[in-house]
Image: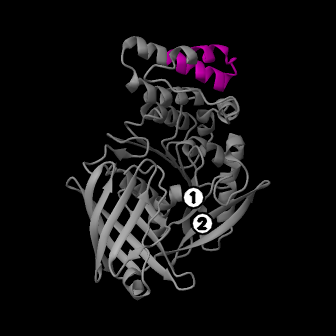
Amino acid sequence: MRLPCVLVMVCLAGAARAQERLSGSWQGYWTRAGDTMPVTMSVQYDANTGRYAATFAADRLRVAGIPFNEVRLEGCCEVRLLLRGDRTTIEFTGRLHGDSLSGVLTDSDGDGRFAFARVPVPTPLFEERDITFSSGAVTLAGSLLLPLTGDSLAAVVFLHGSGAEGRWASRFLAAKLANRGIATLIFDKRGVGGSTGDWRHATPDDLAADGAAAVARLRLEPRIDTRRIGIHGHSQGGTLAPLVVARASGVAFVIGSAASGLPTDSTERYSILNFVYPQATSAADSVSASEYTNEVIAVAYHGRPRARMDSLATALRDRPWFFAPPPPGDAYWSFSPVFAKYQAVEWWSRVRVPVLLIYGAEDQRVPAAASAARIAAALRDAGNADITVRILPGADHTFRLPPGPGGWPVTAPDYLPSLLDWLGKR
């Protein structure tokens, strides 16, 4: 199952006499083609609505607290679950046996099995509170994950990647930190979820101001040590992280996760060509793909007239690698020239706090080695020697290795340890 972004629907509806059998915490696994993935599930019954609410978590997928929508139980024991992801749907058909639930799973990648057993409800190590805060005229909605014990807590604000990213995208890692005694703040990007505004028309300064507002909101929490608030940004968030440091007050450390150190047009070209080149069937095809991509970049980032790009699109539309340019009114054409002016390395040269740069060596969206080298050089040249660089072999943009035989992603084994060990020293 492919999950850069997961939307879950589970159907389990039930007779009243089975309520106590479905409610509770469940621990188990999905297995397919000899590949087994641990999964946990929490189910609660709402007597007011007569429906169930449930969530699931899987460390391998790096998701936590993903909600299920419905519950359906046919007769005494027949259970059906439907799980929709970005590109596939998994159907679970199973049967309750006392405190166990098992059956078969089916999707486009093939058949497998699943099994769960009821387990004691785990004792939470943190509380989660919904909060709102302002960034100029925009109201941002988020969640504060606060450890149940301890004072003078370190804290981390999570910045967003590109696109319409909500707080869910960072919840797994935020929960991992909260379980280790580090407070975290995750929030919906402007125009996403409970946040107002529109990310499609936001400038780098707008997004950096949102990150700075989140840091300011954390500083109001009495149990947080205002001298130990850092930021974590992945992809676009990592690229904008040094600008957030400049806009916020007293950021203590920075984690740049897949942060680009190249000009934004160069990063875009690298990303697009990695997408189209595998579809090119000849050397001539590769040359045409490069020429067309360069023209799209020139129009989007540097304001070149569309005439030649449109002519190339007409001539090349039947090529196997071809992608149509966004339509004229698409936000791509308005935010690209704005982001073209942002020079990440210039802002990194102003950062004076400890920095962790972490990349996947096989990142197809951000050139890992070149970015790490440019950012680290800018920091060192400016006198900042507290730099740690980790480039994880075989890992992609999201620190995953090629999927296992079951089709489920595999996280690079050094990813979480590298990040958590570094944070533990802050």
Residue stretch in magenta: 290-312
Query: In x, y percent, where is residue 234?
Result: 52, 47
Q: Position of residue 166 (x, y in %)?
A: 58, 55
Q: Secondary structure at mark 2?
A: strand
State whether residue 5 appears in this view: yes
Which of the pair 32/229 is nearer the observer? 32
20 left or right of 293?
left
The vertical placement of 407 against 366, above or below, is below
Q: Amino acid at mark 1?
A: Arg
Q: Is residue 299 magenta?
A: yes
Q: Secondary structure at mark 1?
A: loop
Hey, which residue is sitting farthest right in the picture?
A: 137
Task: Work out whether residue 116 can be spotted.
Answer: no
Q: Position of residue 219 (x, y in %)?
A: 66, 65
Pointers 2 and 1 in contact (C-beta within 8 Å): yes
Which comes sooner in the sequence, label 2 or label 1? 2
Which color scheme is applied? Answer: one colour
Whole-number angstrom distance, CA of label 2 to CA of label 1: 8 Å
Judged left or right of residue 115, residue 284 is right
Q: Badge 2 is on which residue?
A: 143
Who is closer to the viewer here, 42 or 268? 42
Q: Is residue 422 above or below residue 380?
A: below
Q: Quadrant of residue 342?
A: top right
Asked whether 52 or 290 is in front, the reply is 52
Q: How many marks?
A: 2
Q: Main secondary structure of the magenta part?
A: helix
Residue lying at 57% horizontally and 58% vertically, measured from the top left: 167
Please name whichever residue, 52 or 207, is drawn nearer the observer in this view of the structure. Answer: 52
The label shown at residue 167 is 1
Residue lying at 68% horizontally and 52% vertically, measured from the top left: 190
